[in-house]
């Protein structure tokens, strides 16, 4: 039993010490300079949305609703969406992982499950992109009518 505890303690110490490295120290400075130089020459992609907010209005608790955010790349280089993360597990974004060339259009669909979410709701989806800011935000909202229970 002592050997098991010692092995667990030792493996935990190794794991903790290996996580102590600073990720930014591993980035090659020459690569960062190359990216900056290319961005200065060509610019960044520009993600222009038709709208960054969508209000579903009044819906019933338990409804699953979906909307699509349309956008255009108005920059001079390909737009890449690397990730889309919602502020809540009840909201699921879907996006293309293919580069969107300058002048092309794309879309992001966002599905919202209102189960156990009565009242006013506002959710944010954060897109990690190669735009100048590095992230773009879209929002959904709804007024969810509470489900009436028939229990007596």
Image (tube, helix red, strand yellow):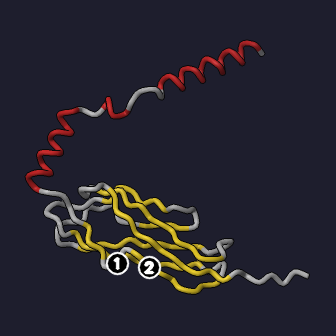
The one of 121 and 150 positioned closer to us in this rendering: 121
Q: Residue furthest front?
A: 120
Q: CA distance from mark 2 to mark 1?
A: 7 Å
Q: Residue furthest right?
A: 152
Residue drawn at x 33%, y 34% as measured from the top left? 24
Mark 2 neighbour density, 10 Å: few (under 14) some (14–19) many (20 or more): some
Q: Position of residue 36 (x, y in %)?
A: 16, 45
The image position of residue 15, as x and y in percent, is 54, 25
Q: Determine which residue is flagged by label 1.
A: 51
Q: Which quadrant: the C terminus?
A: bottom right
Q: Which residue is mark 2?
A: 54
5 in relation to 38, above or below? above
**Location of residue 29 by image quarter:** top left
Quadrant of the image containing the N terminus:
top right
Horizontal and vertical percent position of residue 100: 24, 65
* Circles 2 and 1 in contact, beta carbons < 8 Å: yes
In this rendering, position of residue 39 left or right of residue 108: left
């Amino acid at each position: 039993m002592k050997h098991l505890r010692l092995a667990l303690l030792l493996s935990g110490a190794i794991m903790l010490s290996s996580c102590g490295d600073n990720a930014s120290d591993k980035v090659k400075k020459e690569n960062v300079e190359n990216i900056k130089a290319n961005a200065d020459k060509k610019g960044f992609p520009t993600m222009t949305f038709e709208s960054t907010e969508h209000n579903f209005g009044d819906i019933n608790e338990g409804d699953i609703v979906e909307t699509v955010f349309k956008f255009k790349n108005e920059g001079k280089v390909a737009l890449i969406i690397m990730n889309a993360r919602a502020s809540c597990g009840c909201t699921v974004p879907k996006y293309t992982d293919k580069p969107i060339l300058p002048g092309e259009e794309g879309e992001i669909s966002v599905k919202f499950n209102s189960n156990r979410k009565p009242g006013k709701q506002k959710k944010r989806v954060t897109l990690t992109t190669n735009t100048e800011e590095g992230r773009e935000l879209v929002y959904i909202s709804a007024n969810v009518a509470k489900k009436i229970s028939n229990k007596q």
